[in-house]
Image: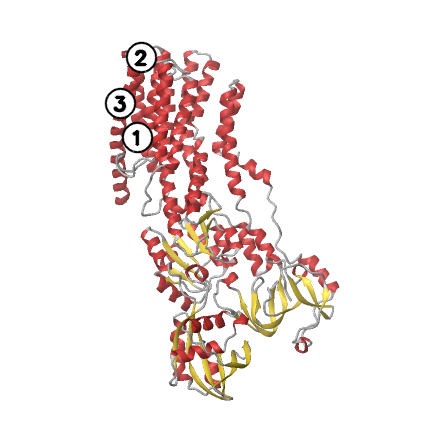
C-alpha cells in the first residue's frame, strides 16, 4: 500500500489481480531501473535553495537605496557623522522590513515536495515490491488500490479506478480511469484497482509541472515600480537644482568646499527616503487590521495591489461551492415517491467507504429521517467502475429486496425500462451541471426502475452576495474551473457571474484583450491554463486576483497580483497565496478589497504630501542661494525639518479614510500635476516669508532662518498634510484620525517651544510664531481651493478623452 512515510524496499504478495497482472509486462529489472534513475533523476521536485544573504543585499539595490548610499558616503567624506548615521539607519531599517516580509512567503515549493514522499507498489525483477516513490522511474509497472496516493503519472493498462483529482484539476467529482487513460501524480484512488506503466516522473509529471509553475511564477512588483516612478520625478528636479547652485557658487567665487554641506543637504532633502518605510508600515498596519477580520497576509505588496484589483478569477470547487456533494433533485418513476427513491439510494450506500456519493445519499436520507427503521442488510457490493453500479440485498418485513444504484442507462437496461422515456430527464439534469444516478429495486433479476437522483456541489450561501458586492466595487468576476461547461454554466448562473462561455483552447499565449472582455466563464481549465490566463490578463493591463483551494490553483495564486486561498485550501495553495482566509466563506474578500483601498488612500496622501514639499522645499533652498545669495535655512534646520515632517506624515498610516467604490490605480501624472501646482504656490509664499523677514522685519540671518523653519513646519508640512488627505475640501468627512491630530499637536507645540526658547536655533517671539501659524491656515484654504479646481478640471479632461 501507499503511505506517507518512507519504507525500506521489501517484497510483498502479488495484488488480487495477479492472474491478470501476469499477462502484463514483468516490469523493469534493477539494472534497468538504476540506468533510468541515472537518466531521469529521482521522482521528486528539486529543492530551490535561495541565497538568504543575496536576497538581503538586494534590498540595498535600487534607485532610492542608491541615493541614500551616495548621501551617506558624502556625509562621511565631509565628516558629518551624525547625518551619515541617521541616513544609514533609515537605509538598514527599510532593507530589514522588506527582507523579513519576503522571507515569510517561501513555503509553497517545499509543501509540493512533501506530497511526493510516499511509497508505491512496483513490479521489479519479476516480483512485486514496495519502493519509495522517489525511486520510481519511467516504464515501471505500478499497481494502485483504494486509498493510494498516485506516485507518478501512470498510463493504465489493466483494471478500472475512480480517482479524486480535484486538488489537481479542479474537477469536483471522481474521474473514472481505465485502459489508455493517464492517472496524474498527486491524485488519490477512491474506488477500484488498476495497474499501469509509469509515463512521467518528477518535474515531468502533471503534478511536477504545477510545482515548476509555482517556482517560476511571480506577481508584478507594482509597489517598487511606483516608488521608482515617484523618485524619478524628484531626482530630476534635484539634479537640476544642485547643478544650478554649484554653478552660481563657482561664478560668485565662493569656495566650493563651503557650499558642499548645503548641496549635500539639498540632495538629502529631496530624496523620498521615507517612501519605502511608509509603504511597509502602511501595509503592516493594514495586515494587522485584516488579520482581525480573518485574513492573513503573506505578501505585503498584495495589500497595495488589492486596491487596484479590477478582475478576480474564482475557482469553483471549494471556493464558490462547498466541495461537498448534495442531493439537488429527485425524479421518481413508476408510482414511487421521492422519499422512497432517496431511501433506496441510501440503503444501497455504505458510510464506511467514505465515497462522497454514498455520503450524500445517507446524509440526505438522515435529514429527512428516512433511515429511522433500517432493514437488515444481507449483502452489499460497493460501486464497481467496470459494472457502473453498486447493490445491496436487504430483508424487511420478511421480504428480501435487491436495490441497485448506478449509471442511468445501465440501470435502465437491467430493469428493462424504456430509455427513451428516461433520457430527456437525464439530459436536462446533466445540462444543469448535476451528476445523475438511477435507482432500481426488485427481487432477483426482476428489477423496477425507481427514479433518478441529481447530485450537485451547491454554491456557498455567501457566494452570490460576494459576486454582487465585488461587481458594485468595480471588480469583474470570472469563473475559472476544471469542471465541464454544463456544470460551470449552472454554477455561474446561480451566483451571478455573467459573460460568454470560453470554448476549449481559448486560453493561450496569444489570448486577445477582446476575448478577455467577452468571456466570463472558463470551463475545463488546467493549471497551466489558469497560470496563462492570469498572465494574459496582466499583459492586458488588469490587476488580477485569483481565488482557489487546491494544488492545481497554486501556480495561478502565486502569479496573480492578489492570490487568495480560502479557509479550506490545501497547505500548498495557502503557501502560494498572498492572502489566506481563515474563516469559512468568501465574504472576507470584500473586507480585503475595502481595507486595501483605505490603505491606498493613506498612501496617496503620503505621496501627495511628500511630493509637494520635496518639490517646493529644495527649490526654495536653491532659490535662496540663486536669487538672495543666502542660505534660507541652515543645514541643521534642514535635518530638523526632515524629521518634523516625517513624524507628522507617518501618522497618515493610521488616519481615517473612506474606501472608493471603484479600483484605485496609481496614475502619477495627475497626482504630480496637483503636487507641482501646490508646490509652486508654497514656493511663492515661502519666498515671500523670507523677503518679508529680511526686508520688512529686518531680522538677522539666524532669526530669519528660524522663522522660515517654523513656517515650513506649519505651512509646508502640516497644511500640506491636511490639504492632501482628501480629494474634496479639507473640512469634509472623513475627519482626521486621532493619530494625525496628536501628531499635529505635538509637532506644532514642540516647534513652538524650540523656536521660543532657542533650542538648536535662534529664538524668535511668540507673535512671529502665531503669525506663521495664521498664515499656514490661510495658505491651507487657498491651496485647498486650487487643489479642488485642478481635480475637477482633470476629471473633465479624462471624461472628454
Q: Position of residue 88 (x, y in %)?
A: 51, 27
The residue pinned by badge 2 equals 694
Is residue 75 left or right of 334 when viewed as pictured?
Answer: right
Tags 2 and 1 touching, CB below 8 Å: no
Residue 435 visible in the snapshot: no
CA gap, disc 2 to disc 1?
26 Å
Q: Looking at the picture, tell me which residue is in the foreground, 130 or 672.
A: 130
**Local secondary structure at mark 2:** helix
Is residue 22 left or right of 607 when viewed as pictured?
Answer: right
Q: Which mark is residue 310?
A: none
The residue pinned by badge 1 equals 677
Relative to 355, residue 478 above or below: above
Residue 245 visible in the snapshot: yes
| Residue at 49% from the left image edge and 81% from the top image edge | 375
Q: Which mark is residue 774?
A: 3
Q: Earlier in the sequence, mark 3 or mark 1?
A: 1
CA gap, disc 2 to disc 3?
19 Å
Disc 2 or disc 1, which is closer to the eye? 2
**Local secondary structure at mark 1:** helix
Q: Position of residue 241 (x, y in %)?
A: 40, 23
Q: Looking at the picture, tell me which residue is in the foreground, 509 or 776.
A: 776
Q: Position of residue 407 (x, y in %)?
A: 48, 78
Tags 3 and 1 touching, CB below 8 Å: no
Q: Position of residue 746 (x, y in %)?
A: 37, 26
Q: How is the image coloured?
A: secondary structure
| Residue at 60% from the left image edge and 75% from the top image edge | 159
Callout 2 environment at 10 Å: few (<14), some (14 to 19), or many (20+)? some
Disc 2 or disc 3, which is closer to the eye? 3
Q: Earlier in the sequence, mark 2 or mark 3?
A: 2
In the rendered image, which quarter contains the N terminus? bottom right
Please identify the quarter of the rendering in which residue 431 is found: bottom left
CA gap, disc 3 to disc 1?
22 Å
Amino acid at each position: 500500500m501507499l503511505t506517507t512515510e518512507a519504507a525500506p524496499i521489501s517484497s510483498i504478495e502479488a495484488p488480487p489481480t495477479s492472474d491478470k497482472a501476469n499477462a502484463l509486462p514483468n516490469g523493469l529489472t534493477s539494472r534497468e531501473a538504476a540506468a533510468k534513475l541515472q537518466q531521469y533523476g529521482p521522482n521528486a521536485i528539486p529543492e530551490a535553495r535561495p541565497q538568504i544573504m543575496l536576497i538581503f543585499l538586494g534590498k540595498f539595490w535600487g534607485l532610492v537605496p542608491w541615493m541614500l548610499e551616495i548621501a551617506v558616503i558624502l556625509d562621511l567624506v565631509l565628516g558629518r557623522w551624525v547625518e551619515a548615521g541617521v541616513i544609514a539607519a533609515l537605509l538598514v531599517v527599510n532593507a530589514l522590513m522588506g527582507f523579513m516580509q519576503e522571507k515569510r512567503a517561501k513555503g509553497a515549493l517545499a509543501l509540493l515536495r512533501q506530497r511526493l514522499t510516499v511509497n508505491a507498489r512496483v513490479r521489479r525483477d519479476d516480483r512485486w515490491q514496495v519502493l519509495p516513490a522517489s525511486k520510481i522511474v519511467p516504464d515501471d509497472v505500478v499497481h494502485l488500490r483504494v486509498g493510494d496516493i498516485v506516485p507518478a503519472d501512470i498510463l493504465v493498462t489493466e483494471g478500472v479506478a475512480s480517482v479524486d483529482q480535484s486538488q489537481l484539476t479542479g474537477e469536483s467529482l471522481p474521474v473514472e480511469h481505465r485502459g489508455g487513460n493517464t492517472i496524474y501524480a498527486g491524485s488519490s484512488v477512491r474506488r477500484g484497482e488498476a495497474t499501469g506503466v509509469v509515463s512521467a516522473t518528477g518535474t515531468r509529471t502533471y503534478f511536477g509541472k504545477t510545482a515548476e509553475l509555482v517556482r517560476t511564477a511571480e506577481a508584478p512588483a507594482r509597489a517598487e515600480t511606483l516608488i521608482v516612478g515617484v523618485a524619478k520625478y524628484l531626482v530630476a528636479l534635484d539634479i537640476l537644482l544642485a547643478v544650478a547652485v554649484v554653478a552660481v557658487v563657482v561664478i560668485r567665487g565662493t569656495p566650493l568646499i563651503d557650499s558642499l554641506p548645503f548641496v549635500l543637504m539639498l540632495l538629502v532633502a529631496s530624496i523620498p527616503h521615507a517612501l519605502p518605510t511608509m509603504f511597509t508600515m502602511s501595509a503592516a498596519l493594514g495586515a494587522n487590521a485584516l488579520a482581525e477580520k480573518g485574513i492573513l497576509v503573506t505578501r505585503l505588496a498584495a495589500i497595495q495591489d488589492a486596491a487596484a484589483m479590477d478582475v478576480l478569477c474564482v475557482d469553483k470547487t471549494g471556493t464558490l461551492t462547498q466541495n461537498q456533494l448534495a442531493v439537488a433533485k429527485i425524479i421518481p418513476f413508476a408510482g414511487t415517491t421521492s422519499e422512497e427513491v432517496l431511501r433506496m439510494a441510501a440503503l444501497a450506500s455504505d458510510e464506511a467507504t467514505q465515497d462522497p456519493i454514498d455520503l450524500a445519499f445517507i446524509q440526505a436520507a438522515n435529514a429527512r429521517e428516512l433511515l429511522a427503521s433500517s432493514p437488515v442488510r444481507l449483502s452489499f457490493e460497493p460501486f464497481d467502475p467496470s459494472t457502473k453500479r453498486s447493490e445491496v440485498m436487504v430483508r424487511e418485513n420478511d421480504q428480501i429486496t435487491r436495490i441497485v444504484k448506478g449509471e442511468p442507462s445501465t440501470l435502465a437496461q437491467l430493469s428493462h425500462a424504456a430509455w427513451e422515456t428516461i433520457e430527456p430527464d437525464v439530459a436536462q439534469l446533466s445540462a444543469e451541471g448535476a451528476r445523475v444516478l438511477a435507482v432500481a429495486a426488485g427481487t432477483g433479476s426482476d428489477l423496477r426502475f425507481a427514479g433518478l437522483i441529481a447530485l450537485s456541489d451547491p454554491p456557498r450561501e455567501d457566494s452570490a452576495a460576494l459576486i454582487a458586492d465585488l461587481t458594485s466595487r468595480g471588480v469583474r468576476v470570472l469563473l475559472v474551473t476544471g469542471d465541464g461547461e454544463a456544470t460551470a454554466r449552472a454554477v455561474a448562473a446561480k451566483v451571478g457571474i455573467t459573460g460568454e462561455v470560453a470554448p476549449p483552447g481559448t486560453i493561450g499565449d496569444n489570448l486577445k484583450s477582446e476575448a478577455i472582455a467577452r468571456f466570463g466563464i472558463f470551463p475545463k481549465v488546467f493549471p497551466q491554463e489558469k497560470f496563462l490566463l492570469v498572465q494574459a490578463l496582466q499583459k492586458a493591463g488588469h490587476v488580477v486576483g485569483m481565488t482557489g483551494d487546491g494544488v492545481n490553483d497554486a501556480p495561478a495564486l502565486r502569479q496573480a497580483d492578489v492570490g487568495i486561498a480560502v479557509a479550506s485550501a490545501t497547505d500548498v495553495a495557502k503557501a502560494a497565496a498572498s492572502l489566506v482566509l481563515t474563516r469559512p466563506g468568501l465574504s472576507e474578500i470584500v473586507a480585503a478589497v475595502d481595507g486595501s483601498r483605505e490603505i491606498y488612500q493613506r498612501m496617496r496622501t503620503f505621496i501627495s504630501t511628500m511630493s509637494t514639499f520635496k518639490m517646493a522645499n529644495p527649490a526654495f533652498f536653491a532659490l535662496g542661494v540663486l536669487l538672495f545669495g543666502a542660505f534660507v535655512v541652515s543645514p541643521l534646520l534642514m535635518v530638523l525639518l526632515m524629521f518634523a515632517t516625517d513624524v507628522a506624515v507617518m501618522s497618515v498610516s493610521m488616519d481615517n479614510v473612506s474606501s472608493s467604490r471603484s479600483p484605485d490605480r496609481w496614475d502619477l501624472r495627475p497626482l504630480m500635476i496637483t503636487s507641482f501646482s501646490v508646490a509652486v504656490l508654497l514656493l511663492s509664499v515661502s519666498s515671500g516669508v523670507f523677503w518679508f523677514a529680511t526686508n520688512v522685519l529686518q531680522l538677522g540671518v539666524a532669526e530669519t532662518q528660524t522663522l522660515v523653519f517654523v513656517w515650513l513646519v506649519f505651512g509646508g508640512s502640516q497644511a500640506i498634510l491636511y490639504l492632501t488627505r482628501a480629494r474634496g475640501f479639507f473640512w469634509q468627512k472623513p475627519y482626521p484620525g486621532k493619530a494625525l491630530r496628536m501628531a499635529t499637536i505635538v509637532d506644532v507645540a514642540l516647534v513652538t517651544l524650540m523656536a521660543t526658547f532657542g533650542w538648536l536655533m535662534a529664538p524668535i517671539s511668540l507673535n512671529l510664531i502665531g503669525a506663521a501659524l495664521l498664515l499656514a491656515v490661510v495658505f491651507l484654504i487657498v491651496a485647498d481651493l486650487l487643489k479642488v479646481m485642478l481635480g475637477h478640471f482633470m476629471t473633465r479632461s479624462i471624461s472628454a478623452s
